[in-house]
Amino acid sequence: MKIFSFLRHHKINFVIALVLLCIQANLELAVPGVMSNIVDIGIARGGIVGEAPVGATASELARIQTDYILGQGAHMLVLTLLSVACSILAAYNASKTSAAIGREVRHALYERVLSYSPAEMEKFSSASLITRATNDIQQIQMITVMCLRIVLFAPCMGVGAVVRVLSTPTGMEWILVVAICIIAIAIGILMGLTMPKFRRMQGLVDRNNLIAREILTGIMPIRAFGRQEHERARYDEANRELTGTYIFTNRAMAFLGPVMMIVMNATTVAIVWFGGLGVDAGTIEVGTLMAYINYVMQVIMSFMILTMISVMLPRAGVAAERVLEVLDTTTSIAEPAPEHAVTRADGAGWRGEIAFSDVTFAYPDADMPTLEHIDFSVAPGQTLGIIGSTGSGKSTLVQLIPRLYDVASGRVTLDGVDVCNIPLTELRAQVGYVPQRRFLFSGTIESNIKYGNDRMDDERMERAARIAQATDFIEAKPDGYRSAIAQGGSNVSGGQNQRLQIARALAIDPKVLVFDDSFSALDYKTDATLRAELGRSCRDAAVIIVAQRIATIMHADEIVVLDDGRMVGKGTHEELLRTCPAYLEIARSQLSAAELGLDDDGHADTPATPVLDQKGGER
Ligand SMILES: Nc1ncnc2c1ncn2[C@@H]1O[C@H](COP(=O)(O)OP(=O)(O)OP(=O)(O)O)[C@@H](O)[C@H]1O
Ligand SMILES: [Mg+2]
């Protein structure tokens, strides 16, 4: 069973549990024997073991009997106290081990997920990863406790009780066999009914989490579109299905209780009935009969516990499999092999020249490549603009630089070294990437800007904020850089959010700056000032700007035009106006002919000196 792979580092705790539980079982099994002594010897024979003392007075006999019964009673008490002590130690051992296993597995899972690339994240979905890290690990923890207590205890107890039943020849063993058969049939039916439901349960919990998460994160559009009812119904359906499954399995399990009670009571009645005949015939003593009933009950209980566990183990096995699936999935973005790794961390460092040569890329499971034959390079100090219609592959392209995805063919290089050969942390430390999808962490403005390096000094943080044009709004806040940021950055405006993201990327002083549609929420003036400031302050960095607005990239040293994953143009703004119809089309849709310096036929005349003062497009 896969579940046991989590327990292998805790063998010693297993041994401890086994020893403690064996002792406990033996102690508990000794109790009915002492009880039978009290009845058979203490009461029936007046507490006299062996020959009766000759000429003892009635009061002496009474004292012998009381002493015997008290002595046996004390014996029983000691046995019980020792067994309680064992049980407490076993419980402590089990809780400690299971908590340790929970911590280890959660840690391993978290480590693994942190190493995942977007491809693996997509494969699992974050909702499922959360269920696996919480619910599934809890299942594993619970089954560990059960293993270390009940699962090991039941066989110890069962075997001991069977030995004692067999060593007491009463001719009533058949009653035990019949009782066990009935229980086996009941549990068999129950398992058949509940197992498929148990298997589905985890998937349903996943779905529930997924919908809940989606509703919580999408609460704004849900309200805006008045879809509360629809979402409520969607959640209700998932919730009802999960609840239904829970109720069904719990009801089925609850059914087992009464069945057990009936079987156990009927067994007792049968033993008393047939045993009574034996007592009558003088072949069996009352105390022995009482102990016998006890042992039979223990055998039945142990059998039941073991079968119940066999119902629960597969369920925990599903949880274990789901956790192992995450632990066994390695990221598709592998670190370079040591013999190929190129590092310049200690030497002159990287310059920041990025080049794509004949790059083709397809998303996992996609039929068609998203990018084909991409070729360009950006030297340090230069700016490359990337423009294209939505879905043309701009974001995909820039994600290849910090290796969020790997190319299918071709090469992406940094200073001529294939990015696949640069250790990931070193590569990513050179790239200041501002993703298109904005995300700020809960904390403060300061913690967000210093995210790339906690030990960064304030001066560097303030410089980054200044270049990103964020100083004004930060300083307008009463707490300045210490102002709180809510999870996901929900308490700052879209433009403020974007500027903080830009500051975060700038703060690590990267050699390559990648802005994926990062100026879209800025007004034209801020956009222009920011880019001008960027040009002044990050003179040595290679800058890649993805934009929808032509004004944002028209001054770039080179512009790449993408259409449906292919490069349909490359050159400066002026060159592209003349040579690239796709670029001209975008340009015309955004700027007037006069602004573009086009003649009335739509042809570029003189190299355009854009008149963008009022829009603030110049640098
Ligand atoms: N994670 C993904 N898995 C599969 N396909 C994807 C994934 N992300 C994007 N795509 C597809 O790849 C294509 C390019 O997407 P991409 O996000 O690069 O476009 P884009 O040019 O950045 O668009 P936009 O201007 O809207 O940001 C799209 O057709 C999109 O459907
Ligand atoms: Mg994009």
Image: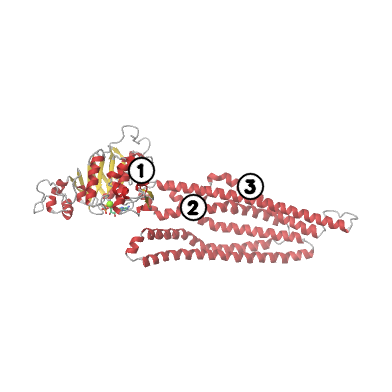
Instruction: Choose between 543 and 18: the one closer to the eye.
Output: 543
Query: Looking at the image, do the residues carrying marks 3 and 1 touch, with CB atoms under 8 Å apart?
Result: no
Q: Quadrant of the C terminus?
A: top left
Query: Looking at the image, do the residues carrying marks 2 and 3 touch, with CB atoms under 8 Å apart?
Result: no
* Amino acid residing under circle 3: Val
In the image, taking residue 24 as reference, residue 213 lies left or right, namely left
Residue 274 position by quadrant:
bottom right
Dot label at residue 452 = 1
Mark sitting earlier along the chain (3/1): 3
Specify whether tag 2 is near ligand 1 (CB below 8 Å): no
Q: Position of residue 216 (x, y in %)?
A: 39, 59
Dot label at residue 114 = none
Q: Position of residue 610 (x, y in %)?
A: 14, 48
Mark sitting earlier along the chain (2/1): 2
Dot label at residue 19 = 3
In the image, taking residue 18 as reference, residue 536 lies left or right, namely left
Badge 3, how many Cα within 10 Å: few under 14, some, many 20+? some
* Amino acid residing under circle 1: Gly
Instruction: Choose between 352 and 54: the one closer to the eye.
Output: 352
Q: Find the distance from the CA under tag 2 to the CA under tag 1.
A: 31 Å
Residue picked out by circle 2: 137
- Residue 157's place in the image compared with 419, above or below, is below
Badge 2, how many Cα within 10 Å: few under 14, some, many 20+? many
In the image, taking residue 29 as reference, residue 453 lies left or right, namely left
Determine the residue positioned at 60% across, 66% down.
Answer: 258
* Amino acid residing under circle 2: Ile
